[in-house]
Image (cartoon, helix red, strand yellow):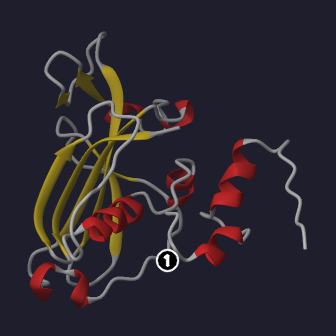
Amino acid sequence: MARIYKLDIRNFRGIKEFSHTFDNSSLICLVGRGDSGKTTILNAISYVLYPNWNLVFYDTDFYKCDTEHPIEIEATLVDLPDELLKEDKYGLHIRGIDKETNSIKDELENDYEKALTIKLEIKKDLEPKWYVINNRQDSPISISYYDRAKLNVFIISDYLDIHFHWRKGGPLYSLLKQNPKIQIRFFE
């Protein structure tokens, strides 16, 4: 299952600029007082890896409602599905994690961990665009919702009823796609 190595957020809701390297942590906790940005960070993660094409944004999603500066959310991921790393997919955009310095490099050396950086950008037209980026390439390459869905990202929240729907992007659907032999039973 893919893991987030680094997250960058710019001009999204109450966050002007945020950058954090999670490194190889297997457990991450966001702790803070109410209204400190925890939910905004979680929403940013779910949006940059959003498994559908129909994500809606509003002027109020921009930092201080300033639509002149685009919303940019970047997630650098490791432990990706092999099919996304093939050359005919996003293989030419693979980046490397230098384990000695914990830095992201655009060139992939033999001892580097493979990574992809997915960027979500929303300009004042409010149309979200997703890309796989690498600074050694002339231009980013679009990543489809179909390929983002292979990352199996979803948020589990206090709205429990949404977690038991069979819709794409939901936990039950993701579990079933990962292992079709899973049997799900409903009890009344």
User: From what the image shows, is residue 134 above or below residue 131?
Assistant: above
User: From what the image shows, is residue 83 above or below residue 7?
Assistant: above
Residue 167 visible: no
Dividing the picture into quadrants, the one containing residue 59 is bottom left
Q: SS at mark 1?
A: loop
Q: Which residue is mark 1?
A: 54
Pinpoint residue 131: horizontal percent, then vertical percent.
33, 54
Residue type at numbered disc 1:
Asn
Q: Is residue 83 left or right of residue 78?
A: right
Pinpoint residue 25: horizontal percent, then vertical percent.
34, 34
Residue 169 visible: yes
Pinpoint residue 69: horizontal percent, then vertical percent.
9, 75
Name the residue: 33% across, 78% down: 127
Name the residue: 55% across, 77% down: 159
Q: Nearer the viewer, residue 83 or 23?
A: 23
Pinpoint residue 137: horizontal percent, then vertical percent.
22, 39
Q: Nearer the viewer, residue 87 or 47?
A: 47
Name the residue: 34% across, 45% down: 28
